[in-house]
Image (cartoon, coloured by chain):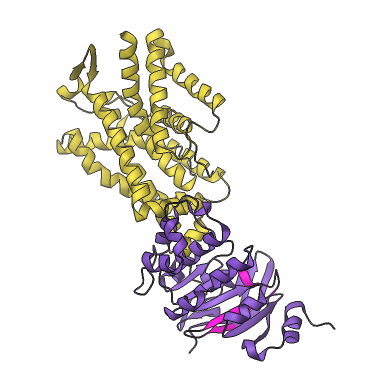
């Protein structure tokens, strides 16, 4: 059975429908990438899974339990942590406090502690007393990832962790993915950077206009098929 | 020498205003909620202590310890079941609801206790004083001031040293992201209001020990508290203490010049600070 599964997921912002029946699955110890252009519904999908947006209960199942209608704090406590788009560090908290608060709703027995997060991103240890928002973009992203890891989640949702960062910094951040996977988490990585997504993912979903248009392993997907799924086929 | 004495008394009076204001400052800092019933809750706390003193024959200083958990529970319930429903993007609903609450509280106290002014029974403490050089300072004002400092130190410890304090600050920054950390904003708000009510109870003790009170004096206490918070800068607890001291000193200096000027001088000091530093003396960076 899949660890996490959406079933005909539909999501609205007021009158505006953003998702039109999305089915994705994530298995234990898997990295799934979700790619697509701006407005394809990737972030809406992440917000739905994490409970920021409420949906029909049965539309999202985590470890067999229907969680579609549960609030974010409850879903987080079940072991599903999110690195939100735009990092969203707490400006009133120092780097270390930002990390500590990641374990507020769930401590979780596991690999990740303050110490192991600092080992994953050594630069943060030196900056631990700085305000979270005084860091560079890449370092802030490391804090956001570390904060989500502090709860030792079973599933880590990463929403556009490369957004607005220099290519060399993106490489640094993605270097952490194998370690996160090795520590026992499954990942969903939302990306606009197709190359990056293909490099880390076991399977890829491509979204367009609120629907999944293509899925498969990176090796099985041709450049042209992705192009069509990403931008729409030329009629 | 008379001026040194006046200013010393004013600083100590500022401690009382800081106690009035600390709960208001805490609640505003965390959830951007201006509680217009704050002054009436202080008066209600004073009546609660009076009832405990009268019924159980306790000393006011023991009665306040009994009143604290009761007031915490009241604040918790009030926030959870009433005020949380008013919070949102619009700042008007919480203002209207707490204004209504203020009217309800005043009239309920009037029904229950009549308009007669009351006072908590005091012993020699009220009139005792200590001589420092040529100035005599009352033990009661000193105790009030010390309590204010202690309350603010405790609040700062909670804010900056505990997991609850981190949750307070995170929720104040960004409630949606805070919920991704497993924080339930409504629960955090309820605890914050409960803590504010504990401070209200301490303020009520000194209000009742130092002067007479009746059901209608709440709104004036609210205004002093409000002015102290604004002078200090919204959300800064030490700023709130400074704000209280500025109003206290202005009032005693005003009264020393002409007794009619006591209250007015406090308000003028507030307006002057507002003119020079519209965001208060110690505003938070990220507001």
Residue B150 in sight in this render: yes
Q: Which residues are magenta?
A: A24-43
Residue drawn at x 45%, y 60% is: A124
In the rendering, what colour is chain A?
purple
Above or below residue B255? Residue B160 is: below
- With B185 as the anchor, is B43 left or right in this view? left
- With B74 as the anchor, is B87 left or right in this view? right
- With A60 as the anchor, is A16 left or right in this view? right
Residue drawn at x 59%, y 83% is: A24
- With B202 as the anchor, is B173 left or right in this view? right
Q: Nearer the viewer, residue B89 or B152?
A: B152
Residue drawn at x 39%, y 60% is: A100
Above or below residue B164? Residue B286 is: above
Q: Residue A213 appears in which quarter of the rendering?
A: bottom right
Residue B46 in sight in this render: no
Q: Position of residue A208 (x, y in %)?
A: 71, 77
In the rendering, what colour is chain B?
yellow
Q: Nearer the viewer, residue A86 or B53?
A: A86
């Amino acid at each position: 059975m899949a660890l996490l599964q959406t079933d005909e997921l539909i999501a609205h912002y007021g009158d505006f429908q953003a998702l039109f029946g999305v089915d994705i699955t994530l298995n234990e110890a898997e990295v799934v990438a979700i790619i697509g252009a701006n407005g394809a519904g990737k972030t809406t999908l992440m917000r739905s899974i994490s409970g920021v947006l409420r949906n029909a209960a049965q539309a999202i199942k985590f470890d067999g339990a229907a969680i579609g209608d549960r609030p974010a704090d409850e879903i987080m406590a079940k072991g599903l942590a999110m690195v939100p788009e735009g990092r969203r560090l707490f400006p009133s908290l120092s780097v270390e406090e930002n990390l500590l608060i990641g374990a507020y709703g769930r401590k979780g027995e596991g690999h990740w502690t303050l110490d192991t997060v600092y080992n994953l991103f050594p630069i943060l240890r030196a900056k631990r007393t700085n305000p979270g928002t005084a860091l560079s973009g890449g370092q802030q992203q490391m804090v956001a990832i570390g904060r989500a890891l502090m709860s030792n989640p079973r599933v880590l949702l990463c929403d556009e962790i490369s957004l607005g960062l220099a290519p060399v910094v993106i490489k640094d951040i993605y270097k952490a993915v194998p370690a996160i996977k090795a520590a026992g988490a499954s990942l969903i990585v939302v990306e606009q950077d197709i190359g990056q997504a293909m490099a880390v993912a076991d399977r890829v979903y491509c979204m367009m206009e609120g629907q999944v248009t293509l899925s498969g392993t990176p090796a099985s997907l041709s450049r042209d098929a992705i192009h069509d799924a990403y931008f729409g086929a030329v009629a | 020498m008379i001026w040194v004495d006046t200013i010393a008394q004013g600083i100590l009076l500022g401690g009382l205003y800081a106690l009035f204001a600390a709960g208001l400052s805490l609640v505003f800092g965390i959830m951007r909620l201006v509680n217009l019933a704050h002054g009436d809750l202080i008066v209600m706390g004073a009546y609660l202590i009076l009832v405990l003193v009268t019924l159980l024959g306790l000393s006011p200083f023991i009665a306040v310890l009994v009143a604290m958990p009761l007031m915490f529970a009241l604040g918790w319930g009030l926030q959870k079941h009433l005020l949380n429903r008013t919070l949102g993007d619009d700042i008007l609903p919480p203002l209207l609801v707490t204004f209504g609450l203020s009217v309800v509280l005043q009239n309920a106290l009037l029904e229950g206790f009549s308009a007669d002014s009351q006072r908590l029974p005091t012993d020699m403490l009220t009139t005792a004083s200590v001589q420092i050089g040529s100035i005599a300072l009352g033990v009661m004002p000193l105790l009030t001031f010390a309590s204010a400092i202690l309350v603010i130190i405790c609040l700062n410890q909670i804010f900056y040293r505990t997991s609850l304090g981190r949750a307070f600050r995170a929720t104040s920054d960004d409630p949606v992201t805070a919920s991704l950390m497993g924080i339930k904003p409504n629960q955090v708000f309820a605890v914050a209001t409960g803590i504010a009510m504990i401070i209200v109870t301490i303020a009520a003790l000194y209000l009742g020990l130092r002067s007479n009170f009746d059901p209608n004096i709440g709104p004036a206490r609210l205004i002093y508290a409000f002015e102290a918070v604004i002078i200090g800068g919204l959300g800064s607890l030490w700023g709130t203490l400074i704000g209280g001291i500025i109003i206290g000193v202005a009032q005693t200096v005003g009264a020393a010049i002409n007794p009619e000027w006591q209250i007015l001088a406090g308000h003028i000091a507030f307006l002057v600070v507002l003119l020079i530093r519209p965001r208060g003396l110690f505003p938070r960076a990220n507001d």
